[in-house]
Image (cartoon, rainbow, N blue to C red):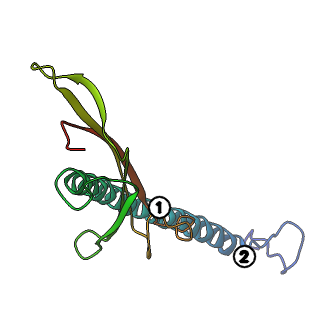
Amino acid sequence: MSGHVFLAPGAAGLHRQSGFGVIMIVVILVMLASLAASMVRMSWGTAITSANDIQAARARQAAKAGVEWGLYMSLRGAWANCTSSTQTLDLRSTSGMLVTVTCSGNATPYVEGGDSGGAPRQVRIYAIEAVACNGATACPDDDAATGLGYVERRIRTSVIDVDVQP
């Protein structure tokens, strides 16, 4: 005899390991797919945040432009008395924004002090507010405000016009 012992298939002491490698491969593939999905989601969130930051900067600049336009209209333009005047500026072709500019102020000037000659000084106070947004119809756009990607910026300023004509 040669000293070798032959065991028949299924005999005691002989275990066959089949399928364990396939299970490990499936587990590893699921983990890699989960990792890839989370990376895509983070990348998507970063892109949305960046786009909103750019839109917010555009909205702020549009609101600033609206305030400057409102100041011009109230002091030198058609809003001479500035009593509840409102206008919507359409800046969608350049910045993608609508700007609603409102001017409110006292209709009649009041006297505050006097000049060096003793004549009374006429004063009028205006409040200019500009609301810029990327809405579809007007600012603020309540329907679009709950949607993804909507931005709105509001700037309010006051101006005093001294020695106005009553």
Label 1 packing within 10 angstroms: few (<14), some (14-19), many (20+): few
Q: Position of residue 49 (x, y in %)?
A: 42, 58
Task: Choose top left, top right, bottom left or bottom right for residue 11.
Answer: bottom right
- Above or below, 86 against 114 in this view is below
- Above or below, 125 against 32 in this view is above
- Above or below, 30 against 119 in this view is below
Q: Secondary structure at mark 2?
A: loop
Q: Position of residue 47 (x, y in %)?
A: 39, 63
Label 2 packing within 10 angstroms: few (<14), some (14-19), many (20+): few
Task: Choose top left, top right, bottom left or bottom right for residue 86.
Answer: bottom left
Task: Choose top left, top right, bottom left or bottom right for residue 72.
Answer: bottom left
Give 139 or 60, whichever is nearer the viewer.
139
Quadrant including the C terminus: top left
Residue lying furthest left: 117
Q: Indicate the amino acid at tag 2.
A: Gly
Q: Indicate the amino acid at tag 1.
A: Gly
Disc marking residue 119: none
Mark closest to the chain's N terminus, 2 or 1: 2
Q: Secondary structure at mark 1?
A: helix
Residue found 44% across the figure and 75% down from its top: 137
Q: Which residue is mark 2?
A: 19
Disc marking residue 45: 1
Residue lying furthest bottom: 9
Quadrant including the N terminus: bottom right
Residue found 22% across the figure and 57% down from its top: 73
From the viewer's perspective, is 10 left or right of 84? right
Callout in the foreground (2, 1) = 1
Badge 2 vs badge 1, beta-carbon distance below 8 Å: no
Distance from Cα at disc 2 to Cα at disc 1:
39 Å
Give 92 or 86, whichever is nearer the viewer.
86
Give 106 or 37, whichever is nearer the viewer.
106
Give 14 or 132, whichever is nearer the viewer.
132
